[in-house]
Amino acid sequence: MSRSPAQHDRPRRAHPGFGTGHEVWIFRHGEVAEEFQGVAYGGMDVPLSQAGHTDSIALAARFRGFPFKAVVASTLQRARTLGELLSAESGAPLETTAGLVEIFRGRFQGRPMKDLLAEHEAELAAIYDDPWNYRAHGGETDEDVLARSWPVLEAALARHGGPLAIACHYNVVRNLVAHALGIEPHVSFRLRVDLTSGVLLHDSPQGWRLLRANVRSPGRGRVATR
């Protein structure tokens, strides 16, 4: 449908979209287990907390009967669980892919955030200042995340149409939305996507549009029975 994101210097302009008229819901997983809270777990396959599992069940239940054409989920269990629940409640087929896993944090991965802030404050600031290029920590950049996640969205939309559901992680949601809307990488951290919430994008003939953000239900009049 389009060139790979890696062929662009950075996503400064909004993606023109494909003009399909379809909607794409992009969901963030639930709360992780207590022992990983406050940890830079990144691409680690950490489990949900009991609250995270309960919230995932509740979110999926609100989309019961919603006419998703497919649900595509990260292979990491915290997002895969949400994908499985959305698939079960909507009746849509489920696909899983490593292209949607959370950003790899390199030598920072698995370390408590309080230790990183105390020992690597300047490096953390550098990541937030230029997430598109910074890789001195041995981890992924926003460019890396987008290069593997955008083709997943693109291929799923071409294969299934919409409405499409994607269950993934904060930094994946942030990069997908930023690329679609043309938000600069360092500015995209302002995008609020709470745990077990979603963003709704519309692939309009005029380009990608943000219809809803940080929501936990399909909205009035949007639920439909298959």
Image (spheres, rainbow, N blue to C red):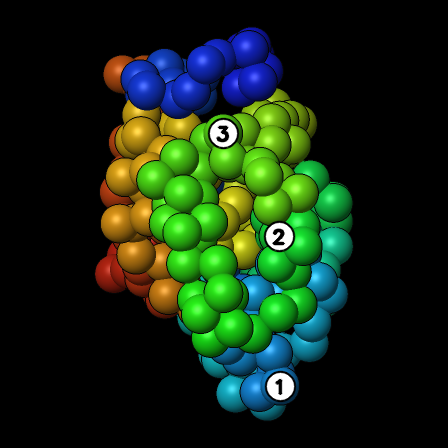
Q: Residues within 10 Å of mark 1 (few under 14, many from 20)?
A: few
- Amino acid at dot 2: Arg
Q: Indicate the quadrant containing the N terminus: top left, top right, bottom left or bottom right.
A: top right
Give neighbour class at mark 2: few <14, some 14-19, many 20+ (Cα, 10 Å): many
Of callouts 1 and 3, the N-terminal one: 1
Displayed quadrant of residue 126 = top left
Can you see residue 84?
no
Judged from the image, the secondary structure of the residue bearing numbered disc 2 is loop
Q: Earlier in the sequence, mark 2 or mark 3?
A: 2
Mark 2 = which residue? Answer: 105
- Measure the C-alpha gap from mark 2 to mark 1: 18 Å
What residue would you read off at disc 1? 35
Check disc 3 and give the amino acid type.
Answer: Asn
Residue in the image at 69% along x and 71% along y = 46
Which quadrant of the figure has residue 15?
top left
**C-alpha separation, residue under disc 2 versus residue under disc 3:** 14 Å
Residue denoted by label 3: 133
